[in-house]
Image (tube, helix red, strand yellow):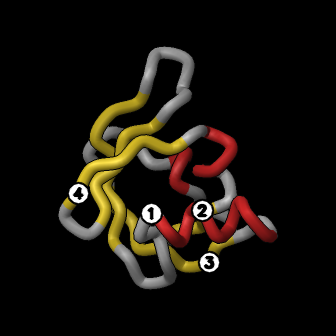
Amino acid sequence: MKTINNLKIGESGVVKKLYGEGAVKRRIMDMGITKGAIVTVIKVAPFGDPIELTVRGYELSIRKEEAEKIEVL
């Protein structure tokens, strides 16, 4: 399973599936990360947390724990 935290800087992926339950999954979806969305990794902090992404034309940062719950193609 390939997740967002496996992508290198500059790589893109299409969201295949979201894992997690309740508030965590809802928060990810509220940020625009839904099935079929294209995400591109812009920056990764020195210790891998947070990860800065471009999704649907805007930039956002997510925690490493959240990135592990987003499967990409």
Q: Residues within 10 Å of mark 1 (few under 14, many from 20)?
A: some
Residue at 52% in and 54% down: 4
The residue under label 1 is 31
The residue under label 2 is: 27
Q: What is the spatial separation of the Cα atoms under label 4 and label 2, in whole angstroms?
A: 16 Å
Q: CA distance from mark 3 to mark 4?
A: 20 Å
User: Which residue in the structure is indicated by mark 3?
Assistant: 17
- Which numbered tag is attached to residue 61? none
Q: Position of residue 20 (x, y in %)?
A: 77, 65
Name the residue located 61 percent from the left edge and 39 percent from the top edge: 64
Where does residue 21 sit, x and y in percent of width and height? 80, 69
Give amino acid for label 3: Lys
Q: Position of residue 65 (x, y in %)?
A: 68, 43
Crowding around mark 2 (Cα neighbors within 10 Å: few <14, some 14 to 19, many 20+) is few
Tell me whether the residue at label 1 lies in contact with that at label 4, contact meaning CB atoms closer than 8 angstroms: no
Give the distance between the C-alpha atoms of the residues marked 1 and 4, in whole angstroms. Answer: 10 Å
Distance of label 3 from label 2 (alpha carbons): 15 Å
Q: Earlier in the sequence, mark 4 or mark 2?
A: 2
As shown in the figure, which amino acid type bears the numbered disc 2? Answer: Arg
* Residue 48 on image: x %, y %: 54, 27
SS type, badge 4: strand
Q: Residues within 10 Å of mark 3 (few under 14, many from 20)?
A: some
**Mark 2 and mark 4 in contact (Cβ < 8 Å)?**
no
Q: Is disc 3 placed on a helix, strand or loop?
A: strand
Q: Residue at x 50, y 82 (%)?
A: 35
Using residue 72 as the reference point, say whether residue 71 is left or right of it.
right
Q: Which residue is mark 4?
A: 58
Amino acid bearing label 4:
Tyr
Q: Marks 2 and 1: CB-CB under 8 Å?
A: yes
Residue furthest right as drawn: 21
